[in-house]
Structure formats: C-alpha cells, structure tokens
Amino acid sequence: MNRILLSRRGFLTSACCLAAAPVFTPVTFAAMPGDSRFVTIVLRGAMDGLDLVQPYGDSGFAALRPTLALTPDTGLLDLDGHFGLNPAAAELMPLWKSRELAFVNAVSTPYRDQRSHFDGQDMLESGGEHVAEEKTGWLNRALAVIPRSDARKAIDVNTSTELILSGPNNVDVWASDSNLAPARDEMQFLARLYAGDPPFAAALAEATRADTASMMVEPDGQHGEKIADVAALAAKMLKGDYRIASFSITGWDTHIGQVGQFKRPAQDLAQAINTLKTVLGPNVWGKTVVLAMTEFGRTIRQNGSGGTDHGTGGCALIAGGAINGGRILGKWPGLGDGQLLDDRDLMPTADVREVAAAMLYRQFDVGVDDLTGKIFPGLGFDKGSQFLKV
Amino acid sequence: MSLSFPTMAAIRFGYGFRPGEAAPRSKDELIGQLSKGASATPDFPLGGPDMRHRAILSLQAQLKQIREDAKTVTDDPTRREMRKAVQRQAQQQFQHDVNLRLMQAVLSPYGFYERLSTFWTDHFSTSASKSLPMRLIVPLYEAEAIRPFISGRFGDLLRSAIAHPAMLIYLDQADSLGPESAGGIKRNNGLNENLGRELLELHTLGAGSAYTQADVTAAAMVLTGLTIDRKEMDIAFRPNISEPGAHEVLGVSYGGRRRSRDDYLDMLDDLSVHPKTAAHISRKLAIHFVSDQPDERMVSDMEAAWKKTDGDLTTVYTAMLDHPAAWQNEGAKARQPFDYVVAGLRALNAGPVNGVVGSFLAANQQGTDEGDMAANTPGLAGSPVTTDPAGEAREKRLKSFRTARALGQGALRRMGQPTWQPPSPAGFEEGFSAWITGGQIAERLAWARRAAAQFGRDDDPRAFLRSTLADAARDETMRVVSQAPNKISGLTLVLASPEFNRR
C-alpha cells in the first residue's frame, strides 16, 4: 500500500495523539490591482478585550476580576497610564511602541442579548444589522465596489471560504498544512459531551493521556509556530497578486480557568501579526492594514470558575506599517454603576462595522454610499469617523 | 419504541441521514430497498464488470510476460520499470474502486441494502492485499458475487461467494489437489484445507459447532476440483484433480466413483440449510445490526424463519425487523469506521444531485502522489510561493486530492478498516469495545474537524445536529453544541458526539 503523506509533519505519527491531526485552516484571498493590502483576522470564541487590554486605571476593575485583573506591579504592560497589555501578548509591545498598533475599545456588532457564538460570528462576518439578514460576507461585497481587474481568474477550489469573504465575487482559498491541535476551549466542550457516556469518557481520557504528546496542551511556543505558518502563508500571497486576506484564530471562549486559557490565543494573535510584518517586509507592511475583531466581548465580572461568560462590548486591534498607531481608540464607557449594559457587559460605544468601514475607505477608497448601503446596511459612517484617525 | 421509526431505520439499519433524502418510514420501505438496491448497478468496479474482466486478463498476461522475461534476462532495468508500471496501474485502479465503494455508500438512497452488502462482503471476507491481481478481482467479487444475491436464498449467495476466483485465490483453493487424484499424483501435491475449514467455521456452521477435523478434511476433499482457469481467470471444475471416491461431511456422503461439480454444490446446499448455519448467521446478523448481546427471542425468530424458508434471507431480515428488540436500546452498537465515515459524509452532503461531498470526492478521485514528496507547499518556511496560475492550480488540485484522500480511504486506513483489506478471513472486529478506544476517538475527532472544515461552513451546528441525529440527539449534546466557540467546533462536536458514534 502506498502511504500518502497528508501534511508536512505529524499526520503519520502515532494515532494516540490528536495534536498530530492536521486541521484545515483556510486562508481566503482576493486579488486586485493597486498596492494597498488588507488582512482581517476573526477571533472566534469571543475574545475578552478586558483581559487583553486591561483598564487598570479604573477603580473597581480589580474587584470585578479578583484573579484576572493585573496591574503594572503584577506584570501588566502599561500602554498609556490607564490601560495595560496582558503579558501573554507581550510580543505586541514593539509594534505599540513603533506606533504600528492601535486598540479599539468598547465596540460590538449590532447583535444583542442572545450571545450565541454562531449568530454573533455570522453578524460579524456578514456585516448585517440582524442575524441572518445577509447571506454573504461584507468583505466579499466590498470586492464588487473596489475597482479591480478581471485579468486574473480565481481558481475553482472545492473548499468553502469563511463567511466573511464568501459571496459572488471571486476569492481563492488556500489551506495551510499547519497541525493545529484543538484549542483548549474546545476540549472542555468535548469533555462535557462525553461526560454522560462512560465508554466514551474513558476513551477520551485515554486519548488525552500525556504519554507521547497531549492533545490538550502543547508546549507553549510550539503552537505559535503553527499559527505563524498560517500568517506566513497569508503574507506570501499578499506579496504576490493578492490584496486581501482573511484567517481565524480560535481558542477565546474562556469560561473556565481563563488565566491559563487566555495565554495561547493571545500569543497566537501576537505571533500572527508579527509574522505578517516580518514576511511582508517593510515596503509591503507599510501598505498593509490588519484588523482583528471578535463576535462579542465577555462579562465584566469573572464567573465562579475563574473565567468569563458571553458579553457585548469588546475590543478590536488595528495594525500596519503606516497607521497612526500607539493609541487607544473608542469612547471608554467606564465600569461604574449605571455604566454597564444590563449591569453585566461593557457598554458598546461604537459599531465594530464602523471600524471595518473606515479601513476599507482608507485602503481602497470605497465610497461612503457603498459602505453604508451595500457593504454594511444600516451603518452610519462618514469621513469624520474617529477610526479614520489611525 | 424509544426513538422514532425513521431515526432508528436510518441510523441502526442504514448509513444515517442525508439532507434532502427521506428516511424509511416503515418496515416495508426498508425491505423494499433490497430489490431496488440489487437492481441498481454498483458504481464499482471502475468501467463495469466486462471491462474489469478484460483488465484482469490483461494484467495476468503482463505478469506472465514479466515472468517469462525473467527466465532469459537478468536484472534488466527496463523489465524492472515495466513491473513497477504494472504494479502502479493495478494499485491506482484499486484506489479508484475504493473511492467508488465509499461513494456508493454515501450516495445510495438504499442504506439497508448498502449496510447488508457491507455485512456480507465482510462475512465472506477476501482481501485485495493477497496479490496484485486481487486488487482488481476483489471489487469485482463484491459487485458480481455478493451484491446481487443478498436478498435471495442463502444457498445461492453461498454458491456465488465460494465459487468465485476471489475466494479461491484468497483461501488457496487453487492450490488444493486431491492427493489420490491423477493430477495430484502427477504433481506430487496435495490437499489444502483452507477453504474447507473456513467454509464450516466462518461461512456456514460457525466455530465450535458440531463438526470435527474429519468433517473439515472431507469438506476440503469435496471441494477438490474446484479451481481457477488461469487463462480465463474464471472458476473451473477439473475432475482430474478432484479426489476420487465418496467423502462424508456431517454424516452426508458426497461424490463417488465419478466426481463432478454437483458434489460440492450439493454440499453447499446442505450446509446452507443446516440448523447450525441458521443459528450462526441469524445471531451474527442480530449482533451486527442490533446489539453485541442480542435478544435471544429475536435470534430464534430469525432462525425459525430461516428453517421455514430454507434460508430465504429477506424473510430472515423481516423476522429481525419484526421483533420489538430491533427498535429498542438505541445506540447499543458502535459505528465501525466505514459506517462512521460514510454517515459523516452523508450528514454533510447537502445540495442537489450528488451534493457537495459527492461532487468534491468525485472531482478528486484521481490525483497523483507527485508533490507529496516535495515540500513545496506555498507559504511554508523555505518554500517558494508560486504566483503563476498554472502552478497554483496544480497545487490546489493536489491539496484537494489529498484532502479527499484524508477524508476517505486515508481515514479508513488510519481507523483500522481499510476497504477490502480485512485482517483475516474472519473479517473485521464486530464488538463495541474494539472500536471505541482512545486512538480511535482521536482519529475520529481529527476526521470530524477536517470534514466539518471542508464541507460544513454553511451549516448552523444546531440545525446540523437536528438534521443529522433527529431525536437521537441528547439534550446535553444540544446544549454543548449550541455553546461551541465557533461553527466548525460545533459541527465537529456533532460528528464526535457519542450518539453519532453509536447506532
């Protein structure tokens, strides 16, 4: 029998470990004339923006999050005297210092109350006002209004794009051969799924026993190299004919033990952005904007199991070689009594779609009417947008 | 009945739900699938039976030529190349058939018929690994010797399975000569008991039932003469290698002064209606479909149906379906890997005609392994990114092909159930604990993630759970799936759930 190598590494290693299973990480692209590049990173699972960018200057923050809140004395990296960066994302600090990175606080999609990851991500990617209102991705609809060349036909691949780029306009999908182990947040769901079925629970325990490698947790750093593969693939394509790329980072659904769980996705995020910068090289990085965003934020207060639950207002990141960064955007609503949404979530003060619209305007001169009509129906956007300041 | 009839029918007696395909609503519908399935031509072997017969003959001729050359030429690179090319071609045809076999199960609306075809192909196990020609013969064997006969008399199925080149090669019958026959004496060669033994132990009476070594030897003697015509690659009966005289199997005498084909056919007919055979196979069916510890009354109903009709299989299946135990204790069995992969691909196979899965697998049947050795994946460290469209197109084709492989026969190999390559004449393991292990769960989870990422992007996991498991979905699974951190995770959890791995 011929043995077929399915990926560069790991696929033929022992079957006892899930870490060896390659996971299909799609990166979607679109090619266009012009020099500007735009990368979207979808942070799936609801990133806790308050953990990434901590308002340590707010009195009361520490009390709301006894085990999660840090201060500059306990390792938080100060950003501006009020907010500080989680040390898990320390690798982002050089970009912050060189003003190639900005954070946007208290943004959300129009999605409210239900707090389902699926619906939340659908809203984030489709750009509509309501769940299931838009069937295509906003980035795909944007392609139709960006002047682009038809000289380059998209290659027909039999894989589906992520929603954000799916739709009638040509995009290509590449899959990285990275072997991404299941994120820790997923593993907890799996454990719950099998909890009531003893033979399956026993089999899962056997599968996750750390004999040769663990599918639960990889040594820190190893995983990052793999997300780096995805980012490197995106960057290399952007150096060629492609101008738009999108991929995802998972692992943000930190209901339990967030102190440990938050580290890996935060490192991944830092690694992904740094890899894009490195591989693109100074010239192309100077024409690139990266927007990382999530479906919704998480609760202000930590829960009983050292984690946080689904919330509303959250944080987005903007990075790029030519941005006016080193600043924190977005109106901060505060954490005091009466300042929260439903007394549990960070109050959104802007629509995350406005951030995306600003980047499309900035990078590709997409007209305001297109932005508020075809791409983000119902969005209010004008050239005075605070997000055009970056 | 704890679950609805269509759910039990689809999951326990079929390969699960496929979006847009109505599940059976009655026993009559399930039984009705048998004639419909049997009258449909299977998708394999590639090119159909006639073309396959010709391909087998041509392979035999090529192998013969290579052997002839070997006598005269020493270590000639051209000859080595030729042998390699012949091997590669046979191997590729086999891979193609394996894909077609998977597609057949995924796309067929007759799940019960398909499940029974798998059962009987396993019951009368042969292996494509036995020799190069077997790569071409085994798929043909299932198509022409098993599938057309699974709803008729067991005696006919037995005749057709035993007297097929695949079985004769696999169990060495072609090498069995009557020691006292003219041909045996001349070639100074003797009896090979392999087929005689498995016929009693596996195919009919069952291990440990009332037969002795003397019966095994006698059965093998009766079978002598049944062999392969290597020129035609068809079965033949040659009296000159048939052991002369009468041979007594289970107290019945076969043969005599003149030996003929009828001797072994009579023996097969008698074995097919033997009470031990009725008991052994009724129980085996009940274990395969319903439970590792089947309800004894259900088994005895099936036996009674067997005896009453001289082994009419449709009547036996009906007796199984008519018993209440067939519709109780859902999920008592583990889906075996082939069952799991097929059910997963069916669940994801939305869309018209052959569906998204069917189209993808069909488009990526034929790939090449070139490039597997070359680490030229774009974007990975140290590898060039190609921006020429032709190169990219090639890359993508290669990737799609690899994905199709990984989701199909690659996965089945890794999960321990490579198509048409059972570990022994006894076929694949049957019991729950053989398939639900740490390694197996790891493989299935990896498969589920890959399949969900490939095909499931448009599905809402909550809706997917409902359409895939219907009322078999537990409340807890619904809760966990609806809270999953993203769609791909949600779909993966559905495919990894205990209830999706059980039937």
Image (cartoon, coloured by chain):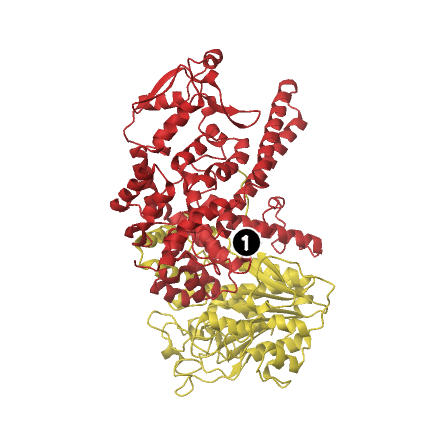
Chain colours: A yellow, B red
Q: Position of residue A261 (x, y in %)?
A: 42, 65
Q: Position of residue B93 (x, y in %)?
A: 58, 39
Q: Residue at x 37, y 46 (%)?
A: B435
Residue A276 as seen in the image, left or right of residue A57: right
Q: Position of residue B410 (x, y in %)?
A: 51, 46
Q: Quadrant of the C terminus of chain A?
A: bottom right
Q: Residue at x 49, y 84 (%)?
A: A332
Tell which of A335 and A173 is nearer to you: A173
Quarter of the image for residue A326 reads: bottom right
In this view of the protein, can residue A7 be seen by the observer?
no
Callout 1: 10 Å neighbours few (<14), some, many (20+)? many
**In the rendered image, the vertical position of residue B440 relative to residue B190, given as above or below:** below
Q: Residue at x 57, y 54 (%)?
A: B360
Q: Position of residue B227 (x, y in %)?
A: 48, 24
Residue A54 as seen in the image, left or right of residue B326: right
How many numbered marks does the figure carry?
1
Residue at the farthest left position: B297
In this view of the protein, can residue B300 be seen by the observer?
yes
| Dot 1 amino acid type | Gly
Chain on which label 1 sits = B
Quarter of the image for residue A252 reads: bottom left
**In the rendered image, the vertical position of residue B225 relative to residue A16, given as above or below:** above
Residue at the farthest bottom position: A338
Quarter of the image for residue B193 reads: top left
